[in-house]
Image (cartoon, helix red, strand yellow):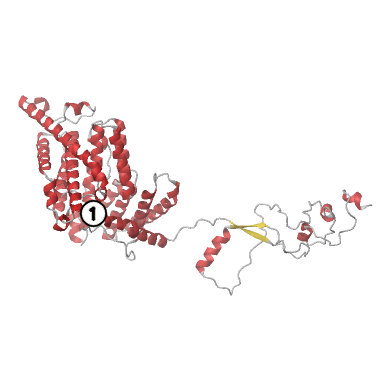
């Protein structure tokens, strides 16, 4: 039988003189007959002949099929452990594919190995960074970004502003919490919308990782009776609390405060810890300051009690100064009145509460920012810019504290509201038991008090709004504007101020959040926006749940 009848298409009976080898015969290590256009052996085996081209054609490989296996290293070879790990990760990121030989090699050699492959580089699997890398990175970031910014905007010597130099002897929970704080600062300064920005998603992963490590360590310390009362445990929980205040976009901070206060009660009180442990006055006084400011933005029936009013006032007289806590440069006299206002808010309305409220307002009105700023240390008075900043701060906080006293005490019922304010909202405080039995003289005096309160409120509101732009344009003052902006926002919404004013306050808070690297100002902006859209006019309507918006 002729070859033609067997193999189908007619082809040359004699192979070409060069005896080319088709790629399939090479792979199978057969002697190719070199027939054109296709190899007869491939046709007989019912295989599609790949031809005689100079380059090896691509071949379909079944998924999961191994084309080659790397040789094992000789037992005598020694490699660095870290390098071996890196190489293993890199090798796992490569996939072999069939590849053609170099064009410089003759296709007729017939000596190519079946294991000839070409490696395809793919992204290596994600590897978690070593913890020490994040710790060193956090130290470098703090010392190069956060610390210089704090020094540059410092109003005076402050024990809170120190560089991070050595964390070797720092407890693990505090170390990982500090790392999470620096990562959070970086996220909040870079991203326009930190919660949804994909560019900072890897940073959030690192933040949660270190926070998780810190929480696990703290849980072990608290669960062990031997370490539960240690000062390292108290400071670890304290540090985590302030980290949550900086990072959280939701008011979930009270659980951490409750945990911290449970540990404090093991020592007795804040004063007992301060007396027993040198250097703890900084931390405990900062906790008092944050709690006082948090109570201003919390419901009157849900106040945070880290200590009694008398103890807070005593600690304030001993340790508090306007430069003690970086973000609250409030004059000590005004801070003491703030403590008393919070205590009075929590009381039921009565004639005694009204009389005490009037005394508080009279003391606030008698405060003179000009006189107070003139009593600053001589070194500060020699700097005209610093002297102007202190005067601006004193004036801002004077107006803000006076407005807060009127708004919050009217909302609680300790001070009477004008008819205009009462009709602006459906909410009304509980009346005094003797309201229905007031004499004409008492009603006249109350009416005069209402007029005085409205005049005082309008005067302080004008002063506060007039100074907002000046405060935001002064670099050192801008860092301390969160609480005055909060008071201004409530006043603007309750008075029905223009949208331009309310948008300006919101924009200032957003800018402060990026400037400070803190989530609290952004949360304050959302609280004010909700209050404005709700049409409320009372202080307690704005803060229906406890917030800590200044830290």
Give the quarter of the image for residue 531.
top left
Residue farthest to the bottom, as pictured: 76
Residue farthest to the front, as pictured: 384
> Residue 265 or 505: which is nearer the viewer?
505
- Identify the residue under disc 1: 264
In this picture, residue 275 sits left or right of residue 498: left
Examine the rendering and report whether any part of residue 374 can be seen. Answer: yes
> Residue 481 or 356: which is nearer the viewer?
481
Q: Position of residue 332 (x, y in %)?
A: 15, 50
Residue farthest to the right, as pictured: 1
The residue sitting at 62% across, 68% down in the picture is 72
Residue farthest to the left, as pictured: 441
In this picture, residue 120 sits left or right of residue 206: right
Examine the rendering and report whether any part of residue 220 can be seen. Answer: no
Q: Position of residue 481 (x, y in %)?
A: 25, 45
Q: Regarding mark 1 in the picture, which secondary structure is present there?
A: helix
Crowding near the residue tagged with mark 1, few <14, some 14–19, many ≥20 C-alpha atoms within 10 Å: many
Is 251 situated above or below 34? Answer: above
Is 546 situated above or below 52? Answer: above
The residue sitting at 25% across, 34% down in the picture is 492
How many callouts does the rendering have?
1
Q: Position of residue 106 (x, y in %)?
A: 76, 63
Give the quarter of the image for residue 408.
top left
Q: Position of residue 153 (x, y in %)?
A: 26, 54
């Amino acid at each position: 039988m002729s070859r033609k009848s067997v193999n189908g298409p007619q082809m040359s009976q004699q192979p070409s003189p060069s005896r080319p080898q088709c790629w399939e015969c090479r792979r199978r290590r057969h002697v190719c007959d070199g027939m054109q256009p296709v190899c007869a052996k491939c046709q007989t085996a019912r295989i599609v002949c790949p031809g005689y081209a100079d380059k090896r054609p691509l071949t379909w490989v079944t998924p999961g099929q191994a084309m080659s296996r790397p040789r094992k290293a000789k037992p005598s070879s020694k490699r660095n452990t870290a390098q071996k790990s890196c190489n293993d990760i890199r090798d796992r990121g490569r996939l072999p594919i069939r590849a053609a030989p170099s064009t410089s090699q003759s296709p007729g050699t017939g000596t190519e190995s079946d294991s000839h492959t070409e490696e395809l580089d793919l992204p290596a699997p994600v590897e978690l960074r070593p913890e020490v890398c994040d710790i060193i990175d956090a130290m470098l970031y703090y010392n190069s970004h956060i610390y210089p910014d704090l020094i540059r905007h410092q109003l005076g010597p402050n024990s809170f502003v120190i560089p991070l130099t050595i964390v070797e002897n720092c407890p693990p929970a505090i170390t990982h919490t500090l790392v999470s704080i620096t990562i959070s600062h970086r996220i909040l300064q870079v991203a326009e919308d930190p919660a949804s920005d994909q560019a900072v998603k890897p940073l959030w992963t690192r933040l949660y990782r270190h926070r998780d490590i810190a929480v696990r360590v703290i849980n072990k310390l608290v669960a062990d009776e031997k370490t539960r009362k240690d000062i390292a445990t108290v400071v670890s929980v304290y540090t985590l609390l302030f980290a949550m205040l900086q990072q959280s976009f939701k008011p979930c901070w009270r659980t951490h405060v409750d945990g911290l206060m449970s540990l404090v009660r093991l020592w007795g009180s804040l004063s007992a810890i301060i007396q027993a442990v040198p250097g703890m006055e900084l931390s405990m006084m900062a906790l008092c300051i944050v709690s006082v400011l948090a109570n201003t933005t919390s419901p009157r029936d849900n106040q945070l009690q880290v200590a009694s009013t008398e103890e807070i006032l005593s600690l304030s007289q001993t340790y508090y100064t306007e430069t003690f806590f970086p973000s609250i440069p409030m004059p000590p006299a005004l801070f003491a009145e703030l403590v008393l206002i919070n205590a009075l808010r929590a009381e039921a309305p009565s004639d005694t509460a009204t009389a005490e409220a009037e005394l508080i307002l009279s003391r606030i009105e008698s405060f003179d920012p000009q006189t107070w700023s003139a009593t600053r240390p001589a070194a500060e008075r020699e700097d005209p810019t610093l002297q102007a900043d202190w005067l601006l701060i004193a004036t801002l906080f004077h107006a803000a504290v006076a407005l807060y006293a009127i708004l919050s005490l009217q909302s609680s019922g300790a001070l009477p509201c004008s008819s205009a304010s009462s009709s602006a909202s459906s909410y009304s405080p509980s009346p005094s038991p003797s309201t229905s039995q007031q004499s004409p003289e008492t009603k006249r005096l109350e009416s005069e008090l209402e007029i005085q309160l409205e005049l005082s409120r309008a005067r302080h509101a004008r002063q506060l709004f007039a100074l907002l732009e000046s405060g935001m344009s002064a670099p050192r003052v801008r860092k301390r504007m969160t609480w005055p902006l909060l008071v201004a926002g409530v006043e603007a919404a309750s008075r029905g101020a223009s949208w331009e004013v309310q948008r300006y306050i919101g924009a200032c808070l957003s800018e402060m959040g990026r400037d400070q690297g803190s989530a609290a100002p952004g949360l304050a902006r959302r609280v004010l926006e909700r209050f404005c859209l709700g049409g409320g006019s009372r202080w307690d309507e704005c803060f229906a749940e406890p917030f800590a918006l200044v830290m």
